[in-house]
């Protein structure tokens, strides 16, 4: 099995408890520090027992070669593998390993669960042995700061003991003097980072300005300006698009301003554009159209009509593209002959944007024009007219 989830949620503890309760031999490896020899030794040792478990902590740190090395032994059932990871296993774990394991998500602890863990640690003989007492709101404050990471919460509790271990009861304000920065758990290499980026785009797409600002703040609080710039630009073109082209351009300007001023001031122009994008009407019509065109381009031959090629060959002068005849441009067929009936763009008739409605009206006007590849006849008709 692969246990995956944010730090401090008990993945390794669950794996160790599982092995302990089964009463079987267990080898423990940390993928960050172990080499191939240590893996080989753990595998050989496991063969000496009828049932054995190999726990690999931070399993996503194993390179593909080491993951492939484990594969035949897992396949043969020489031992049970339990991997623990903070990364998304669908990205970080090889497909061969994934197909032979169960992927079990370990979610962040809720506030009540963190408070329960803190109180137990404070009073336990194996913990702080009652040497410190906290007010209820102090426990709650630590739990909220932890973001579901019990390890972070326990470290903060231990800091309280070191700072206030004179028998005084610890209040929320006393905890704030030690730690007031939330443990957002955003790391550019971890799943929480990608979840926050995804949350930003989906909130803007769903026109929830408050949620959009929340995810923006989470990402910027971790100093991740680059991811925010890329995602906002993609979101502007993909989700707002033709419904508000001006907002798309202002997004680009806001990103340029953020680059010039840097953090922390960058939050001001970025906050501006997030509010505008979230509150703007949305349209994916241009994005969906280009996706359809890309799909065709990848599987179809590359054909360009002779009369619109950069350097046409074997064409008479009257058959060439009429650069100086703008009145004819809308009457010319530009698609290859075999694709002339294809349409990639689909008008968004439900759009509330007056700009997009105007573009759609022009689209329908253009679709009524009977286009032709006979440039010579078009020119002749224009001359006679």
Image: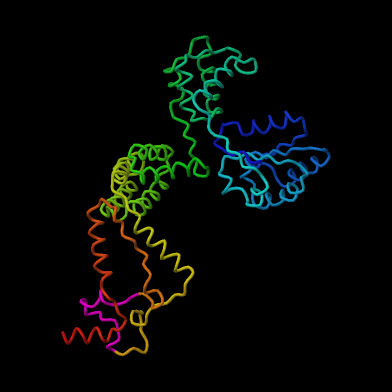
Color scheme of the displayed model? rainbow
User: Residue 327, image x and y in percent?
Assistant: 20, 77
Q: In this view, does 361 lie above or below 149?
A: below
The residue that appears at 79% across and 37% down in the rendered structure is: 51
Q: Where is residue 262 in the image (x, y as percent from the top left)?
A: 35, 44
Outermost residue toward the top? Answer: 167
In the image, 359 versus 263, the foreground residue is 359
Answer above or below: position of 152 versus 138.
below
Left or right: 279, with 104 as reference point: left
**Residue in the foreground of this view, choosing between 94 and 375:** 375
Q: Give the range drawn in magenta.
A: 317-334
The verdict on residue 340 being magenta is no
Give the quarter of the figure containing the N terminus.
Answer: top right
Q: Residue 251 in the image: x percent, y percent?
A: 31, 50
Residue plotted at (48% across, 30% down): 147
Whether 230 is drawn above or below 160: the answer is: below
Q: Residue 205, position in %: x, y?
A: 36, 46
Residue depicted at 31% across the width and 52% down the height: 252
Q: In this view, does 193 lie to the left or right of 124?
A: left
Image quadrant for the C terminus? bottom left
Q: Give the image quarter of residue 200.
A: top left
Task: Name the residue located 29 percent from the left edge and 81 percent from the top edge.
Answer: 321
Is 368 situated above or below 114?
Answer: below
Nearest to the observer: residue 227 or residue 115: 115
* Image position of 223 (left or right of 257): right
Q: Total number of numbered labels?
A: 0
Q: Which residue appears farthest toward the right when viewing the image?
A: 48
């Amino acid at each position: 099995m692969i246990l995956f989830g944010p730090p401090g949620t008990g993945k390794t503890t669950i794996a160790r408890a599982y092995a302990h309760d089964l009463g079987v031999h267990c080898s423990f490896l940390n993928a960050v520090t172990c080499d191939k020899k240590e893996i080989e030794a753990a595998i050989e040792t496991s063969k000496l027992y009828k049932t054995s478990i190999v726990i690999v902590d931070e399993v996503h740190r194993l390179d593909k070669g080491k993951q492939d090395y484990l594969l035949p032994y897992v396949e043969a059932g020489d031992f049970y593998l339990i991997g623990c990871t903070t990364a998304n296993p669908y990205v970080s774990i090889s497909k061969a390993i994934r197909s032979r394991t169960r992927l079990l998500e370990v979610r962040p602890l809720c506030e009540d669960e963190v408070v329960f863990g803190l109180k137990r640690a404070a009073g336990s003989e194996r913990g702080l042995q009652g040497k410190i007492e906290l007010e209820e709101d102090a426990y709650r404050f630590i739990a909220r700061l932890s973001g579901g990471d019990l390890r972070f919460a326990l470290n903060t509790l231990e800091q309280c003991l070191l700072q206030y271990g004179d028998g005084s009861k610890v209040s929320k304000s006393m905890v704030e003097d030690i730690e007031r920065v939330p443990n957002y758990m955003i790391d550019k290499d971890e799943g929480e980072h990608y979840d926050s980026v995804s949350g930003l785009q989906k909130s803007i797409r769903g026109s929830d300005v408050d949620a959009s600002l929340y995810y923006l703040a989470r990402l910027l609080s971790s100093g991740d300006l680059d991811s925010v710039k890329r995602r906002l630009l993609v979101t502007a073109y993909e989700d707002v698009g033709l419904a508000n082209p001006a907002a798309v351009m202002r997004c680009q300007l806001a990103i340029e301003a953020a680059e010039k001023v840097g953090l922390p001031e960058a939050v001001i122009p970025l906050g501006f554009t997030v509010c505008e994008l979230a509150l703007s009407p949305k349209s994916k019509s241009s994005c969906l159209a280009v996706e359809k065109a890309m799909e065709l381009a990848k599987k179809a031959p590359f054909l360009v009509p002779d009369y619109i090629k950069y350097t046409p060959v074997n064409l008479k002068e009257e058959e060439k593209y009429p650069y100086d005849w703008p009145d004819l441009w809308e009457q010319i067929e530009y698609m290859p002959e075999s694709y002339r009936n294809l349409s990639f763009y689909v008008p968004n008739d439900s759009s509330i944007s007056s700009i997009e409605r105007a573009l759609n009206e022009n689209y329908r006007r253009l679709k009524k024009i009977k286009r032709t590849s006979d440039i010579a006849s078009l020119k002749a008709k224009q001359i006679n007219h």
